[in-house]
Each structure stands twice: as structure tokens, then as C-alpha cells.
Amino acid sequence: MMPVMRRGRFRREARLGAGAQGEVVAAFDTWRDVPVVLKRLSGSAAPRAELVALRHVRHPGLVEAFGLWRDGEETFLVEERIDGPPLVDWAAGRTAEEIAAAVAPAAHALAHLHARGLLHGDVAPQNILVREGGAVLIDLGLSRAIGSRASAGTPGFVAPEVLAAEAAGGAADVFGLAATLCAALTGEARPS
């Protein structure tokens, strides 16, 4: 079981964004002396699904979940902060060989997830960050069991079977990875 982390441990630094699943904040863990990301757990089940997925799989190509933090009435998922640009931004001016080498850890992470019966659910440029040592998959908020049905994901990077709300296998994540690589190689934000 992951620990519940209480008030006083984290120093909020900046708001990174917000979406359907809640606010995301850059923070600093004063106990561990490391930068982290805090994801507010809203009424959505997505951050809880992300925590469940990350609790059961660890891989260098996947963001690490540290636990939950309660601040008054609010609860946050605490994750490792990956300091690096999205793959598509990082790839500008690089060779195909450099891009392929950088994305390999994320591809291995997908295989690791799939071997454990899980889909990432939203493999797209904003969810692959590049740090020293290679690419890391982040944001498992849409993760789910292989064979489940959902019609969610980033437009332009969603497999046809997902768009049709059919049962999705690992190939749906591979489609997103291939579309992301296409975008990285061509410099286009979305594949055509």
C-alpha cells in the first residue's frame, strides 16, 4: 500500500496545467529532497486508475508514483517529476536514429505494461517526455485493462478501435506510439 502523505511535506512551485482530470502542480518534496508532480484527485476516477496502474508496474520508461497526499479536503497523486521536453520538441533537428534510440525506453515500458494486462490509454506527444537516458511515459490517467472499451485519448493519436469504442489491445498503444514517432520525425504536431 502506498503511503498517504500529509500537509507540510510538499512546497508547491508552479501550476503545470489542468484538464478534465484536474489540476497538475509542480512541487518539491522537502522530505525526499526531490522535485515531484501533484495531481489533484477530482471526482474523476482517472488519477485513482493511474495510481493503481503505477503501483503494480515499475519500469525506467514509466513515471514513478510515490503515493497520495492529503491537504485539508484535497487529495493529490504524487509522482516523480520528469524534467525534460516532450518527445516532439526534443526531436527537432535530430536524426531518425537519435529519435529511435531515445524512444526505446518508452516502447519497452509499453511492452512491460501490456505484459501485465494494462494499456497506457493515451500514448501521445505530450505524454512522452525525454530526459537523460531516454523517453519516459507519463500520465496513465486513461490506463485500463487490455480488452476494455473506451473512446478516449488525444485526437490524432487514438487507434481506430478505440475511436469505435471496441475492445482495445496493446496495438492501440502501439498505434499512438507510431503516430507520435511520425510527428517527431516530421516535425508536425499531429499526423495527417
Image: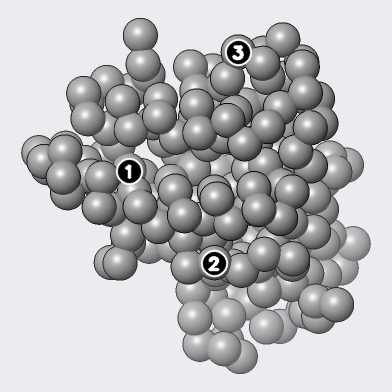
The residue that disc 1 covers is 87
Query: Which labelled disc corresponds to residue 59?
Result: 2
| Number of other residues with Cα within 10 Å of mark 3, as a class: few under 14, some 14 to 19, many 20 or more | few
**Front residue of 181 and 16:** 181
**Quick check: 161 left or right of 150?**
left
Q: Amino acid at mark 3?
A: Pro
Q: Residue at x 80, y 59 (%)?
A: 52
The crowding category of the residue bearing disc 2, from other C-alpha atoms within 10 Å (few below 14, some 14 to 19, many at least 20), is some
Residue for badge 3: 160
Q: Which mark is residue 134?
A: none
In the rendered image, residue 112, in percent from the top left (x then y), is placed at 58, 57
Q: Is residue 172 above or below residue 44?
A: above
Q: In the visual, does 8 lie left or right of 91?
A: right
Q: Is residue 60 left or right of residue 163?
A: left
Look at the image and tell me whether residue 24 can be seen.
Answer: no
- Label 2: state its secondary structure: loop
Q: Quadrant of the N terminus?
A: bottom right
Q: Amino acid at mark 2?
A: His
- State the SS at label 3: helix
For badge 1, the amino acid type reads Leu
Real-space Cα distance between discs 2 and 3? 28 Å
Label 1 to label 2, Cα distance in Å?
A: 18 Å
Q: Position of residue 97 (x, y in %)?
A: 16, 45
Q: Earlier in the sequence, mark 2 or mark 3?
A: 2
Residue, x 63% and y 43% (percent of image)? Answer: 120
Contact (CB < 8 A) between labels 2 and 3? no
Residue lying at 28% horizontally and 66% vertically, measured from the top left: 132
Q: CA distance from mark 3 to mark 1?
A: 23 Å
